[in-house]
Amino acid sequence: MQLRKYSIFLLLVIWCSSLLADEATVTLVTPSGELQISANELRAMAGNELEIYDPFQRVSIPVRGVDLIDFIEHFATDHSQASRLKFIASDDYETHISQWNSGNWLLVTHENGHELRLRDHGPIKLVEKSLGNRNPENLRNFNDWVWMITTIEVLE
């Protein structure tokens, strides 16, 4: 009887955590206000597929996501004066990107064919499509990569 109660409790916890993961949102802050965008909406928009070298995992992985410039143009109608973007993660880590419209940034929603979840540092990660000539062994070169994004702020 005790084992059955524990099993039911465990199943409820797993089920509830999967519901919470699906309800994740990213807040977009622009000069004209805030917009909540669901992770599911971003996943549906994720049409850019490529393979990247992830210096933190030290492997090449197939990813899918939304180009940052497309995301901003789609959701931030007042983005024309944006000089940089600020990204805030769930652990309060933040970084600023001034070359946000270079075409090299991707909001990753999927890795290895699976939706990113919190345990994968998701549901949204910001990565570069090309590492350029930077040494991937020096992780300090990638301080502008951020995962578990909760807020993207458009700064003038």
Image (cartoon, helix red, strand yellow):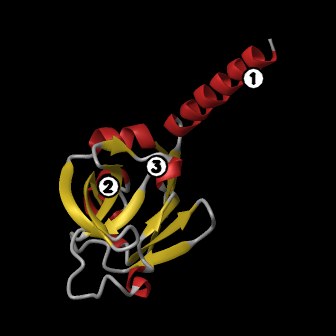
Q: Residue at x 42, y 83 (%)?
A: 139
Q: Distance from label 2 to label 3 (Cα)?
A: 15 Å
Res 111 seen here: yes
**Mark 1 vs 2, N-terminal side:** 1
Q: Residue at x 54, y 32 (%)?
A: 18
**What kind of residue is marked 1?**
Tyr
The disc placed on residue 70 is none
The answer to whether 21 is drawn above or below residue 147 in the figure is above
Q: Position of residue 2 (x, y in %)?
A: 81, 17
The answer to whether 95 is drawn above or below residue 77 in the figure is below
- Mark 2 vs mark 3: give the one in front: 3
Q: Distance from label 1 to label 3 (Cα)?
A: 29 Å
The answer to whether 127 is drawn above or below residue 70 in the figure is below
Q: Nearer the viewer, residue 108 or 88?
A: 108
**Mark 1 vs 3, N-terminal side:** 1
**What kind of residue is marked 2?**
Phe
What residue is pinned by disc 2?
71
Q: Residue at x 60, y 30 (%)?
A: 14
Which quadrant, please, contains the C terminus?
bottom left
Label 2's element? helix
Res 30 seen here: no
The disc placed on residue 6 is 1
Q: Position of residue 123 (x, y in %)?
A: 46, 49
Label 3's element? loop
Q: Distance from label 1 to label 2 (Cα)?
A: 43 Å
Q: How many marks?
A: 3
What residue is pinned by disc 3?
123
